[in-house]
Image (cartoon, grey):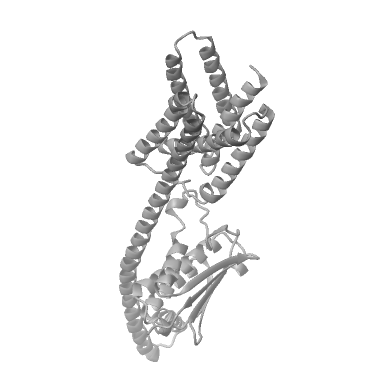
């Protein structure tokens, strides 16, 4: 095998494997990942070298060799797909997704390289060709990774549609067919060969964007469904908790009157203590907004149980234009996120949550801040969940933003020096 032949084999397989693993990068790795990856790379290279040697030794018709080369391409596609499953914790759909996307990345970069070389470097040495294919591959992979792959979220649930698998296989089949049969048929027609290469590259681009476009659509569908479910759950919870707190307040109010009457005849310390407890539960929050009172009462009881200090300076009268469910959802998510962030902190002096509001001529502002144990990563202005399955978590902050935008408001979140802050601006209601 000559140096140019070896380089052609190496560059082809290296680009294919790199593309597949670049897409699979976000998926959880299996134990001993480096060893598993090394085994997969070795198997793929040994297979390809052995298969090419077998073809070289066979004395059969060229048409039969074309069939064998087609089988070879499908075998490589299958091996890369199995490699994803061997190295990462994923199902068959994720394996297919990564293999198809990686194959498309390799295909579109290689076809672009072949077109550029035919147009501008037809007589170049293999070394110049090697430099060109490295440059083209680097540009494609870097651009696709940072523009699309990195922004996509598929670490949790992958697409599991039969339509997707059909489109994936059709895309790969078309690319392989064009690579083997169409290019051989156009061998004597240079211009036609360029057209075939261009069409083949466009098929790869189309298949790649179908994969990630479908993924984005699925993610948007799941997010929309989850947000709708959150809104419905918030409505139901608010109605239940509103009734519970109303009953609790009535009972505590009645108990207060009974204790007051009893205190006239028996003014013991125990009765005074009971009166204090009853009065606390009788009027924990009076913000001027019933939904906000219910929410803050619920949160304050949870904070008391968790030994978290909640300080509030809130005027709920400026929120009358908002629905009770939206108020409940906004403040519940805001404060539950704060409680979750504080839960891992052991220092009592840092188990604090502060909630304040301020009315200005232009807007009603809400400010919440709390300590945090670790600084979260932000994406699109929102902190990203640290849970493994991101697809089904992290909706609390999205729900906060959604409620704010519903009323023409804005929401900004920041984290620095161990403190997480949320600032919300809501226009005054009509």
Residue sticking out furthest to the bottom: 264
Q: Pick the residue in front: 137 or 275.
A: 137
Near-viewer residue (111 or 392): 111
Left or right: 271 as drawn, with respect to 29: left
Q: Is residue 238 visible?
A: yes
Horizontal and vertical percent for residue 193?
49, 30
Quadrant of the rendering where the N terminus is positioned: top right
Identify the image quadrant of residue 318.
bottom left
Q: Is residue 137 above or below residue 426?
A: above
Quadrant the C terminus occupies:
bottom left
Residue at 40 percent across and 75 percent down: it is 407
Note whether residue 287 is visible: no
- Residue 202 screen position, x and y as percent: 46, 40
Q: How many marks do you count on the picture?
A: 0
Location of residue 316 with respect to 299 vertically, above or below:
below
Q: Is residue 10 above or below residue 268?
A: above
Return the residue nearer the eye: 222 or 31.
222
Q: Determine the residue positioned at 55% across, 46% down.
A: 145
User: How far across and how far down the image is residue 406, in percent?
Assistant: 39, 71
Residue at the (55%, 14%) spot, across then down: 53
* Residue 54 percent coordinates (x, y): 52, 12
> Could you tell whether 401 is left or right of 32 in the image?
left
Which residue is depicted at the point 51% across and 29% down?
190
């Amino acid at each position: 095998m000559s140096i140019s032949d070896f380089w052609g084999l190496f560059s082809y397989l290296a680009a294919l494997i790199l593309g597949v693993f670049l897409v699979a990068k976000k998926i959880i790795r299996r134990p001993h990942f480096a060893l598993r990856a090394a085994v997969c790379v070795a198997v793929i290279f040994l297979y390809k070298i052995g298969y090419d040697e077998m073809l070289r030794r066979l004395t059969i018709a060229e048409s039969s060799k074309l069939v064998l080369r087609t089988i070879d391409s499908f075998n490589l596609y299958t091996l890369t797909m199995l490699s994803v499953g061997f190295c990462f914790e994923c199902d068959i759909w994720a394996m297919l997704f990564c293999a198809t996307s990686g194959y498309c990345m390799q295909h579109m970069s290689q076809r672009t390289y072949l077109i550029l070389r035919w147009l501008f470097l037809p007589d170049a040495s293999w070394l110049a060709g090697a430099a060109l294919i490295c440059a083209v591959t680097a540009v494609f992979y870097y651009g696709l990774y940072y523009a699309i792959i990195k922004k996509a979220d598929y670490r949790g649930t992958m697409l599991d549609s039969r339509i997707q698998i059909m489109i994936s296989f059709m895309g790969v089949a078309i690319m392989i067919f064009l690579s083997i049969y169409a290019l051989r048929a156009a061998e004597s027609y240079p211009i036609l060969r360029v057209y075939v290469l261009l069409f083949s590259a466009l098929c790869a681009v189309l298949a790649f964007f179908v994969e990630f476009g479908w993924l984005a659509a699925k993610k948007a569908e799941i997010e929309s469904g989850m947000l709708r479910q959150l809104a419905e759950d918030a409505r139901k919870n608010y109605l239940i908790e509103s009734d519970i707190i109303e009953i609790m307040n009535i009972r505590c109010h009645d108990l207060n009157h009974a204790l007051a009457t009893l205190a006239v005849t028996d003014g013991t310390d125990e009765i005074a203590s009971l009166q204090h407890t009853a009065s606390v539960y009788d009027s924990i929050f009076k913000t001027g907004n019933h939904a906000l009172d219910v929410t803050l009462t619920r949160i304050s009881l949870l904070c008391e149980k968790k030994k978290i200090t909640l300080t509030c300076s809130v005027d709920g009268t400026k929120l009358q234009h908002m629905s009770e469910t939206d108020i409940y959802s906004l403040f519940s998510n805001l404060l539950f996120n704060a409680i979750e962030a504080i839960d891992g902190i052991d220092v009592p002096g840092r188990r604090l949550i502060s909630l304040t509001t301020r009315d200005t001529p232009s807007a009603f502002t809400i400010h919440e801040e709390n300590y945090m144990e670790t600084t979260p990563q932000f994406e699109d202005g929102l902190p990203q969940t640290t849970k493994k399955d991101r697809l089904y978590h992290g909706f609390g902050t999205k729900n906060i933003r959604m409620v704010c935008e519903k009323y023409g408001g804005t929401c900004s979140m920041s984290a620095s020096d161990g403190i997480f802050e949320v600032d919300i601006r809501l226009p005054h209601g009509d």
